[in-house]
Every structure is written in C-alpha cells, then in structure tokens.
C-alpha cells in the first residue's frame, strides 16, 4: 500500500508541474476516457486546482468524483483533504451543509486509516463548521472532538478550534464560555506571533457585543483593537474594523458617524491584501447613504466605481449581496423601479440562502419602498409587515441574550467593577433628594421585576426539566420495547421456527398431508409474528424498501387497496430513527385495518429540503380525535405521538366522520 501511495504522489506531482498551464477541457477528456484510476485521480486534482474559487459548481462536482474515486482506491488521506476543501463551497455556496456532513462522515467512517492528527482534527473542524448552519450543539461537539484529536504540534489549529467554538458559544448565548474560548485563542495566537489570527479572536469578542446590541461596549473594544493593529503594523485589517463600526452606527441610527467611518474604511482599504467583498460593501453603503441624502451626483460617482471593479461577484455570495444592495438602492432612488425590484428580489434570495437576518430584514424594507413607489400598496404593506416581524424577532432575541449577558457579568470581576461604579453614582445622586427618591422608586420596581423574572425562570426550568424527564422515560421505554421485540423475534425465528422446519422435513417423508399443512401454516404464522415484532427488512433492504415491502404485503394480504409515493430516504436517519419511522407507518396502517373499515388508503413519503414529510390517509369511517386521544385504551395513537416526539417531529391528525382520516408527520433532518 505504501508503494502505491508513493506512486500516486509522484504521478500527481509530475502532472501538476508539467500540465498546469493546460486548460480544463484537456483534463476533463482524460477523466472521461482513461481506464487508469491513478491518471484519473491526477486529472481530477488538476481540474480542482483550476476551478477552486473560480467555478464553484464545477469544483463541487469534480470534488465529489475525486472523493469517491480516492475512497475506492483506499487513499483515505487524499479523500480527507478534498472533503475538507469541499465543506466551505457546499455549505456556503450550494447551501447544503447536510451533504458536506455526509461526505465528511464517509471519510470519518475509516478514520482508523488516518494517521495524521492534523487531518483528523481538521475533519472534525470542517464538520463543525457545517453543523453551525444546522445544530450549534453538534458543532460544539465536533470542535471538542477536534481538540481531542489534534496533537501538541498542531498548536495553531488548536487555537483555531477555540476561536470557532467561541463563535458557536456566542451564537448560543453562552457568553462565559465564548469569552473563555476567544481569550484562549487570542493568547495562543499572540504567543506564536500570529497577529493576524489574533485579530480574528479579538473581533469575535467585539462581534459578541455588537450582535446583542451593546454598541458602546463594542466600540470601546474596537478602538482598543484598532490601536493595537496600528502598533503591530496590521494596516490591512483597519478598513474592516472601520466598516464594522459603520454598520454599528447604522443600527444605532447615527447616519453622519456611519458616513465618516465608511469614508475612513474606503481610504484605508488595501486592495492588494484585503477581502474585495468588504470593499464592495463599503462602496455600496456609501451609495445608500448618498441616496438617503438625495445626493445623486455623488451616488452616481460611486455606482460607477462599483460597476468598474475588476471582480466577479457571481462566485461570491457575500460580495454579490453587497453589490446588489447599493445598485438596487440607486435604481430605486433614480426611478428605475422595475430593475430595482429585480435586483432586490435577487438580493433577498441570496440573503435567505446565507441566513443573514439583518440583510433579510433590510431587503424586505427596500421591497416595501419599491412597491410603494410603483403604486402596489398591498405588496408594500405585506413586505412592511414582514420587516416589522423580523425586527421584533431580532429585538426579542437580543433582549434574551442581553439578560444572559448581564447574568454573565454578575459572575465575573467586571460585574464587581460595574457595581462599584453604580454605587458611586448613587452616592452622588443622594445630593439631590428628589432624584434620589426617583432612583429608589425605579430601583424597587426593577428589583420586583427581577424577582418576578427569577421566579418565572425557575418555574419554567422546573416545568421544562419535568417535561424532559417524561419524554426521556417515554423514549427509553420505546427503545426497551424495541430491544425486547428484537430478542423475541430472533428467538421465534431461530428457535421455534427452526424446530418447525425440522418437523416439516420429517413429515415430507411420512405422507401425512393434513399434518404438513398444519406445520406450514404454523411456520407462516411464526414468520408473520417475527416480522411484526422486528422488521429485519430494515437491515437487509434499507428503510425505503422496508416501507414499500410492508405496504405491498398489506395490499396483497388484505381487502384494503393501498397506493404509495415513496421517495428514497436511505442513510439520512440513524438506525434507531429508521425503526421509529417504520413503526409509525406500520402502526398507522394497522389502525386503518383494525378500525377504519376503509376500502382504500395511500402512503406518501417525501423529502423536501431539510424535511421528510409522511402522510397516511384512508377513506374510512373517521373518528373524534380529542375523544380518542383521551381514551386510556387508545395506546396506538399515543405511541404514534411518542415516536414522533422522539424524532423531534410534528404530527397533524385530520379526521372527518364518514369521509376518512389523514395522518401527517413532519421530521427535520
């Protein structure tokens, strides 16, 4: 195997040196024609070098081919490197973090073959980055795994992991943990004189304040960071900090200060080293400012700068979002409403894809303005309502995080300093008796509110804890039942079933026809019971085929006519979850056979975006859902709800007397 890997490395190196100047079509021809897997892998590697950051769709497609081929050739570390490179474009460009996770999992399934700690830890970091789009708790778990797998020589990678975990904690509102991780990362970067990365750690702390509305605190920290940047000669980062300060001023409604920061950001921008998408953002925000001030000559000047940039925004969603912001605002201000509307709708799609709530809210606000200018007042009002809803949502979450933050301060030395300052202020206020009384009054009200909030929070936690315990008990009961069913099913199949088969073989020679028939019936009965107790088809055929087999079995062995539309849902749920989904459909069909007196039924399983939708309907008698669910004997219906809760899903029951019943289940991926 070592010789094989060395041979591949030599060929890859040779191809990279000789053929780098050749165009993509040359290597595509090799990929499509060669029978030699090593040559094919090398050609794919050359294509990836030429499509990285320039042709994201092609890069994704050829990366998938490379990883599949490398795994087939047992070149696990090659596959690992490409899986890591693929994570970012899949998560952020294709907006498919789930596929990125699936690909990394396919490599981690053979992690015992990966000897390089840098690669192994890197895979967990990349999976964590993808999980930040889906489940922050899973992202934190992945970053913990990365820390376990990195060795001491991967010092800077460990610092990176603390930085990423700090960002995840920050978004979860766990500010103590976030602050600790940002500080660790900052210290480690500073120790290795990796000052540019040290800046990112400090920016994480500033973003934590800014995203939760602590703009003054964010400014104090940002001013300190700018001073440090100047001392260390990190001038290429200055523009970004001025730009971020401008965005904070915009949220605070301080237009003049926002404008001053934008001009400073433009002046300090380093085109040779800085991120061009930031520059596009700076120019676009300046255009928006001039449009708001009705200074169209200046706005037009900056639109010209924007349009003449030597930068393709189509492969960079953040840059395209910034570009569309300024251009659409200018077109709306100058009255070109149709073009403005088209660009704004395009911007909304990108903002939703990137899940940037502030941009989504501002885009709906601009749509409302454009529709108003077009005279389409109903659409204007609808978009304005959406803007208000989003603003309220962001505000409420910000308040929640603010409360968490102040609880954090209480546990730190900073809180003590704040308390000293507040005590000093109160002492000064005592000089004015009337003001002192007001302070005491408001302080008393605040104390009462705090106690009320504490009591309410404790009560909610108690209820939540009780609910979690109940759900955990129900889930463990289901798991225990499934385990016992599997054991009994195996005993029936391996014990009684085998004995009956031996008896059948002996009867074959006796000529006793009646006895043979009775034994055959008994064997079929044992098999049916074994199959119902535990669906072995799940292991043998997969969840999709197992569901189809169950439906066909009922269709062929009962008077009920069943039709089905089943999407392939293999390998997207855990084994435990697949059993629960199979049981939900099995129990639903069993209820139709037992209680509905239906002539026909239909089962639908659809995979839509990040959700699986299942519906089971019949044309039977129907039933009163509230009455049936309250009935202590209605175990089947309660079990359906418990299994759905186990899968973190939702269930909807629609039943009309003499018309039929529809059971609809929705499960997140």
Image: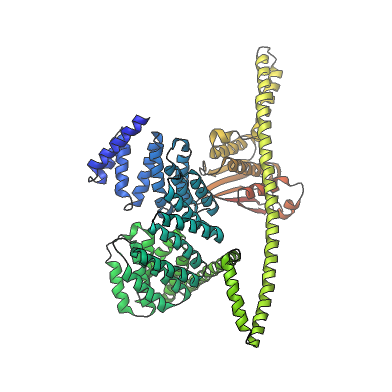
Give percent across and percent down for residue 376: 45, 74
Is residue 610 positioned above or below 344 on the image? above
Report the front residue among 217 and 298: 217
Q: Nearer the viewer, residue 12 or 189?
A: 189
Residue under the image location 51 percent in, 41 percent down: 571
Q: Position of residue 6 (x, y in %)?
A: 33, 33
Q: Residue at x 42, y 43 (%)?
A: 119
Report whether residue 327 is seen: no
The answer to whether 25 is drawn above or below residue 414 in the figure is: above
Which residue, as the protein is rendered here, is positioned at the far right? 632
Q: Residue 353: x and y, percent?
A: 44, 58
Name the residue at 47% across, 52% down. Answer: 161
Residue 601 to residue 487: above or below: below
- Quadrant of the rendering where the N terminus is positioned: top left
Quadrant in the rendering for residue 416: bottom right
The front one of 85 and 522 is: 85
| Percent x, y of residue 321 | 39, 64
Number of labels in the image equals: 0
Identify the image's colour scheme: rainbow, by chain, secondary structure or one colour: rainbow
Q: Name the quadrant containing residue 429.
A: bottom right
Tell me if residue 418 comes above or below residue 113 in the rendering.
below
Question: Which picture quadrant has residue 450?
Answer: bottom right
Q: Is residue 632 left or right of residue 258?
A: right
Task: Specify whether residue 261 is in view.
Answer: yes
């Amino acid at each position: 195997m070592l010789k094989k890997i060395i041979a591949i490395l030599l060929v890859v190196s040779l191809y990279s040196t000789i053929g780098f100047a050749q165009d993509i079509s040359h290597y595509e021809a090799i990929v499509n024609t060669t029978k030699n897997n090593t040559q094919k892998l090398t050609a794919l590697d050359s294509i990836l070098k030429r499509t990285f950051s320039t042709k994201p769709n092609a890069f994704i497609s050829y990366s998938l081919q490379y990883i599949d081929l490398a795994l087939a050739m047992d070149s696990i570390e090659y596959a690992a490197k490409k899986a890591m490179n693929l994570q970012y474009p899949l998560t952020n460009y294709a907006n498919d973090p789930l596929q990125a996770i699936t690909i990394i999992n396919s490599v981690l399934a053979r992690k015992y073959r990966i000897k390089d700690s840098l690669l192994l830890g890197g895979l967990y970091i990349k999976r964590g980055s993808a999980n930040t789009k889906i489940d922050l708790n899973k992202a934190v778990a992945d970053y913990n795994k990365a820390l376990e797998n990195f060795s001491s020589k991967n010092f800077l990678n460990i610092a990176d992991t603390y930085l990423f975990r700090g960002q995840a904690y920050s978004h979860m509102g766990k500010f103590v943990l976030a602050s600790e991780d940002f500080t660790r990362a900052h210290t480690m970067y500073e120790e290795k004189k990796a000052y540019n990365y040290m800046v990112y750690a400090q920016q994480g702390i500033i973003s934590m304040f800014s995203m939760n509305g602590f703009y003054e605190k964010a400014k104090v920290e940002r001013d300190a960071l700018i001073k440090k940047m100047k001392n260390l000669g990190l001038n290429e980062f200055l523009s970004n900090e001025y730009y971020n300060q401008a965005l904070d001023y915009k949220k605070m409604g301080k237009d003049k200060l926002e404008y001053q920061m934008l001009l400073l950001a433009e002046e300090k921008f380093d085109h040779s080293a800085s991120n061009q998408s930031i520059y596009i953002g700076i120019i676009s925000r300046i255009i928006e400012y001039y449009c708001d001030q009705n200074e169209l000559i200046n706005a037009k000047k900056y639109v010209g700068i924007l349009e003449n940039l030597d930068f393709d925004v189509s492969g960079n969603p953040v840059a395209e979002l910034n570009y569309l912001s300024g251009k659409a605002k200018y077109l709306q201000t100058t009255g070109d409403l149709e073009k403005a509307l088209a660009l704004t709708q395009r911007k909304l799609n990108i903002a939703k894809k990137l899940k940037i709530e502030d941009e989504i809210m501002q885009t709906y606000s601009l749509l409302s303005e454009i529709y108003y200018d077009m005279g389409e007042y109903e659409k204007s009002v609808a978009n304005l309502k959406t803007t208000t809803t989003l603003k309220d949502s962001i505000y409420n979450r910000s308040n929640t995080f603010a409360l968490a933050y102040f609880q954090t301060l209480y546990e730190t030395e900073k809180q003590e300093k704040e308390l000293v300052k507040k005590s000093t202020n109160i002492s000064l206020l005592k000089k004015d008796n009337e003001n002192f009384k007001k302070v005491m009054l408001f302080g008393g009200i605040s104390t009462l509110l705090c106690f009320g909030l504490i009591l309410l929070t404790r009560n909610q936690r108690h209820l939540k804890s009780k609910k979690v315990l109940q759900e955990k008990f129900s889930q463990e009961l289901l798991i225990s039942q499934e385990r016992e069913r599997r054991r009994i099913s195996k005993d029936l199949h391996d014990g009684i079933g085998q004995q009956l088969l031996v008896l059948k073989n002996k009867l074959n020679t006796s000529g006793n026809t009646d006895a043979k028939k009775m034994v055959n019936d008994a064997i079929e009965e044992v098999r049916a019971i074994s199959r119902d107790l535990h669906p072995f088809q799940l292991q043998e055929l997969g969840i999709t085929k197992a569901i189809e087999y169950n439906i066909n079995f009922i269709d062929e062995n009962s008077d009920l006519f069943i039709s089905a539309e089943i999407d392939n849902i293999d390998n997207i749920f855990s084994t435990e979850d697949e059993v629960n989904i199979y049981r939900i459909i099995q129990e639903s069909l069993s209820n139709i056979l037992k209680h509905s007196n239906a002539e026909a039924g239909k089962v639908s399983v659809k995979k839509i975006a990040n959700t699986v939708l299942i519906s089971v309907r019949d044309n039977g008698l129907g039933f009163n859902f509230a009455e049936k669910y309250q009935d202590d004997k209605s175990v089947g219906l309660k079990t359906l709800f418990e299994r759905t809760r186990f899968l973190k899903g939702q269930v909807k029951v629609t039943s009309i007397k003499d018309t039929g019943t529809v059971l609809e289940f929705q499960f997140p991926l």
